[in-house]
Image (spheres, rainbow, N blue to C red):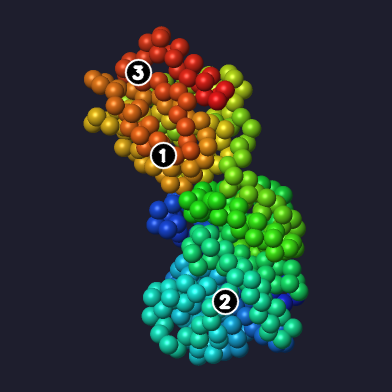
Amino acid sequence: MRNVIVDKVSEELYLFRMNDEAVKYFEAMWEIPEGITYNAYLLKNDDATILFDGWKREYEKEFVGALSKVIDLEEIDYVVVHHMEPDHSGTLPKILELNKHKATVLGHPIAGKLMRSFYNLGDAVKFKAVKNGEELQVGKTRLNFIYDTWLHWPDTILTYLPESEILITCDAFGGYSIPKTIYDDNENVVSEYLPYARKYVANIVGHFKKHIIKSIKNIEDAGLKPKIVAPAHGLIFKNNPERIVDYYLKVAKGIPEQRKVLVVYGSMYGFVEKAVNLAIREIRDLNFKPKIFKFTDKSYDSLSDIIGEVPDCEAIVLGFATYEFDAFPYMQHVVRSFVQKTNYSKPVLLLSAYGWGGRGVNRIKELLSDSKLRVVSAVEFSSGIVRKDEDRIREGVKTLLNA
């Protein structure tokens, strides 16, 4: 089971990590060639055996096999369900079956309803809804539950283990990819991982990013200063747990990386590409760093990656053509995704080519009209660029970068 990792996070807490290299489209939508991990945890001491979450259902055989090497599944006293999304709860029915339903399942009140709906578990499940701020004492072990609503479902909770100062966070503070290490003890691994965490936030939690800020405030207000942050995806932070919390806060607030400009364009026959390349040269001449994505007849870049670059950019350039009295369809899709997932206050420059009539700019402005993304300049030109169009594009870039 080369994709299964079992490790002791602390004296009493085990990690069970599945490296999912098979998934290509997370949520059947987001391209993740980098893969993802599913992290479940098991607390075992003389007083109790408590399982926290699970894996996708397709890996239930591997999950059962890994758990069985550490415990007899009938020994599990409690199963904490932090979030009912099936990448974390898919193995729950099999675990409860092998446990002979001896365990009490703990979770948000909504989780109990979803559990029965998703898996038709019926009355055999001993479910107990936990309250926000509730503490459960099991022998010498204490579990403190904190509601983490809308990160990114309404049923999400966190568990804090006061004795070991570990915060188990489910989707919060997680990320895409299969890191080379388990923990944040290698700077090269962490540096490589953080952009995948940003991409994950933008793709998965982006619509609810304000709740990241609320969640972190709730943790601080509760006086919690965890020594270990243990998410359900990606790296466990025990060397510097503040780093991932601070990084999440930065992404949620859209704090930009200095001088980074996101450039996204669609070009059917090269006219838009020519205009965008002129803008890119101007951006570089002004000592800014363009991050470039395109849709052409030769290649299509990943929408997941594009969305992941929005939170920390300073400005955005969008290039597109008029298409059937409208804007190029895939660029409309990009813009709608920005509005839904990464609706930050960022200045935007529009570059739009047309043949017999221009309608693209108005359409993109319309899509952005109710968002925080603000169009500061728009250059619409007949497909064959002339000198005056070049001057307008350069001026548009300067307006964008001074906005």
Q: Are marks 3 and 1 in contact (CB under 8 Å)?
A: no
Identify the residue under disc 2: 130
Identify the residue under disc 1: 370
How far is the residue under mark 1 from the one under mark 2?
38 Å
Q: Foreground residue, 161 or 294?
A: 161
Q: Is residue 178 visible?
A: yes
Query: Could you tell me which secondary element the residue under label 2 belongs to?
Result: loop
Query: What is the three-letter code of the residue carrying label 1?
Result: Asp
How far is the residue under mark 2 from the one under mark 3?
60 Å
Earlier in the chain: of badge 1 and badge 2, it is 2
At 69% across and 60% down in the image, what residue appears?
A: 221
Q: Is residue 299 left or right of residue 191?
A: left
Earlier in the chain: of badge 2 and badge 3, it is 2
* Crowd tier of the residue under label 2, counting other residues whose Cα lies within 10 Å: few below 14, some 14–19, many 20 or above: many
Extreme residue in the top direction: 387
x then y, percent, for residue 295 = 38, 35
Earlier in the chain: of badge 3 and badge 1, it is 1
x then y, percent, for residue 296 = 36, 33
Location of residue 366 by image quarter: top left
In the rendering, which numbered label is found on residue 47?
A: none
Query: What is the three-letter code of the residue carrying label 2?
Result: Val
How far is the residue under mark 3 from the one under mark 1?
25 Å
In the rendering, which numbered label is found on residue 381?
A: 3
Q: Are marks 2 and 3 in contact (CB under 8 Å)?
A: no
Location of residue 81 by image quarter: bottom right
Mark nearest the camera among 3 and 1 is 1
At 53% across and 78% down in the image, what residue appears?
A: 129
